[in-house]
Image: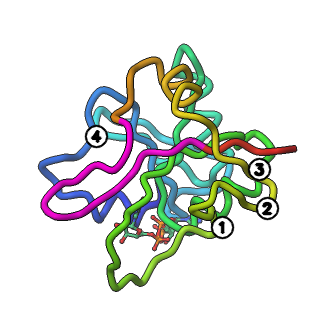
């Protein structure tokens, strides 16, 4: 995640549990990363991926934003899949996902996968259809690159 996303997580929820937390910032030199019990701090996306590759057994990395880091990740060929929570309620926003994934399941270079494919990939049964929490409606989706 980007440093601003880390800062946006309430301290009582940090680090996000049961996973390695990697924060990307220019505060450490590009080409390096440092680790402490709370989080790993990396100087670039590639440094973050190297840190994950050397530490996590299944070497699977999830990019959790924000917009600057999503943009960099989407430019990489290794980024093959998007796990999207589509919020169906309108909000005033100042930060946006960098590509358009349309509700009809089409997007340039990307396609929406089926619910069965989503379940298979995450290894559990994902709630199907429109979900609602505190009045906000949303749907879980998985998209994959078409190239
Ligand atoms: N809805 C969602 O799915 C979702 C997910 C995540 C975040 N968010 C929201 O998005 C907002 C943050 O997004 P954002 O785009 O403003 O910031 P961001 O991507 O979270 O973080 C930006 C910071 O990352 C570091 N960074 C970016 N590119 C870098 C690079 N190439 N090399 C090294 N460091 C780099 C810099 O940190 P330094 O300034 O420390 O150098 C930069 O200021 C928050 O409001 C958060 O709540 C939403």
Q: Name the residue under label 4.
A: 16
Under circle 4, the secondary element is loop
Q: Residue 53 carries which label?
A: none
Toward the viewer: 128 or 18?
A: 128
* Lower position in the chain sequence, tag 1 or tag 4: 4
Judged by depth in the image, the label closer to the viewer, 3 or 1, is 1
Please give left or right for residue 95 compared with residue 76 in the image. Answer: left
Under circle 3, the secondary element is loop
Label 1 to label 4: alpha-carbon separation: 26 Å
Q: In this view, does 38 lie above or below 137?
A: above
Mark 1 surroundings within 10 Å by alpha-carbon count, few (fewer than 14), some (14 through 19), many (20 or more) = few
> Bounds of the magenta span?
128-142
Label 2 to label 3: alpha-carbon separation: 16 Å
Q: Mark 3 points at which residue?
A: 76
Residue appearing at x 38%, y 23% in the figure: 125
Mark 3 surroundings within 10 Å by alpha-carbon count, few (fewer than 14), some (14 through 19), many (20 or more) = few
Q: Mark 2 points at which residue?
A: 108
Label 3 to label 4: alpha-carbon separation: 25 Å
Toward the viewer: 38 or 88?
A: 88
Q: Residue 99 carries which label?
A: 1
Q: In which quarter of the image is the C terminus?
A: top right
Mark 3–mark 1 contact, CB under 8 Å? no
């Amino acid at each position: 995640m980007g440093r601003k996303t880390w800062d946006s997580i309430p301290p009582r929820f940090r680090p996000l549990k049961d996973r390695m937390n990697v924060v990307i910032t220019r505060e450490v030199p590009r080409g390096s990363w440092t680790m402490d019990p709370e989080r790993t701090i990396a100087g670039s996306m590639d440094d973050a991926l190297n840190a994950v590759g050397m530490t996590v057994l299944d070497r699977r990395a999830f990019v959790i934003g924000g917009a600057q880091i999503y943009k960099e990740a989407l430019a990489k060929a290794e980024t093959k899949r998007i796990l999207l929570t589509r919020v169906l309620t309108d909000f005033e926003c100042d930060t946006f996902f960098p590509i358009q994934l349309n509700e009809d399941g089409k997007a340039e270079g990307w396609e929406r996968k089926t619910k069965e494919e989503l379940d298979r990939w995450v290894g559990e049964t994902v709630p199907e259809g429109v979900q609602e929490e505190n009045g906000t409606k949303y749907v879980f989706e998985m998209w994959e690159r078409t190239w």
